[in-house]
Amino acid sequence: MLSEMRSAGRQKAEPLHPLLARLDTDGRSRVVAHLRAVEHRRGGLLTAIGQPIRSVHFVEHGLIAIVGRDAAGASAEAGLVGPGGLIGVAATLGLSRIASRDAVSLSATRTLAIDVTALEHVVALYPEVRRDLSSYAGHRHDQTARLCVCAALHTVEQRIARWLLEAAALCGDGPLDVTHAQFSDLLGVRRASITSGLHVLEGEQTIRCRRGQIEIRDMDGLARRSCGCESLSVGERDPHTA
């Protein structure tokens, strides 16, 4: 049950989300009639593995981790979504209405939600929107494949640096809301390894750790520490290049 969601009222303005940018005036009106602004608390679930996907979420603010789990319940990151991204794209394209991964708010998050059925009607009328959503789904798939390679080949310090750079690219230069425990779950490594890796980066003055937050102090230094996988990620802000 996705009890962490709280509706903040219906969105009245025309949608500005990049994945809706190709809609004409009539298409925007169709979407706006069904949009509702939703606030999600830190740690809240937007989708849960094995549960029906009833709403698609266009992300306006915050950072959301896509998390996969094995048969024993252990978790690892399968993607990272920020402003301009989308949660529930598979349901929109008719691929599956059952979530195969969790979508977890890493910070207070704001989305514009729309029922899957309502968005399906719009997508059917506007092939160019379907193409953009399909391109975005391809980007999500590529990101998951890249993270599998990263997890298998790179050190914890490299992966932490990669994650911080990717999160900063999505959310800007401000402090990132992520705890040691969340990092442990996302990277699929022991919490002690996360603490050790963060201490190394902090000792090099590339980051500063506070309770539940990490501030990047030296972007170039962090990039040198990274495995470089973040440079292979296509920006989510422009769906036409995703």
Image (tube, rainbow, N blue to C red):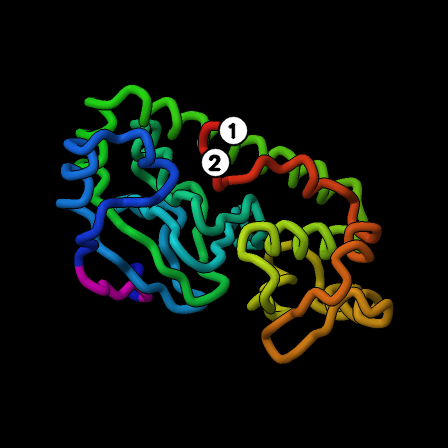
Residues at badges 1 and 2 in contact (C-beta under 8 Å)?
A: yes
Task: Work out whether residue 68 or residue 105 is closer to the camera in this orientation and state it.
Answer: 105
Amino acid identity at mark 1: Thr
Task: Work out whether residue 220 or residue 233 is closer to the camera in this orientation and state it.
Answer: 220
The alpha-carbon separation of the residues under discs 1 and 2 comes to 6 Å
- Element assignment for label 2: loop
Q: Main secondary structure of the magenta part?
A: strand
Residue at left 57%, top 58%? 172
- Element assignment for label 1: helix
Q: Which residue is mark 1?
A: 241
Residue 206 counted in the magenta span: no
Amino acid identity at mark 2: Asp
In the image, taking residue 174 as reference, residue 15 lies left or right, namely left
In which quadrant of the rendered image does the N terminus lie? bottom left
Specify the label residue 238 is tagged with: 2
| Residue 210 placement (x, y as % from top left) | 66, 78
In the image, taking residue 197 as reference, residue 113 lies left or right, namely left
| Residue 94 placement (x, y as % from top left) | 29, 27
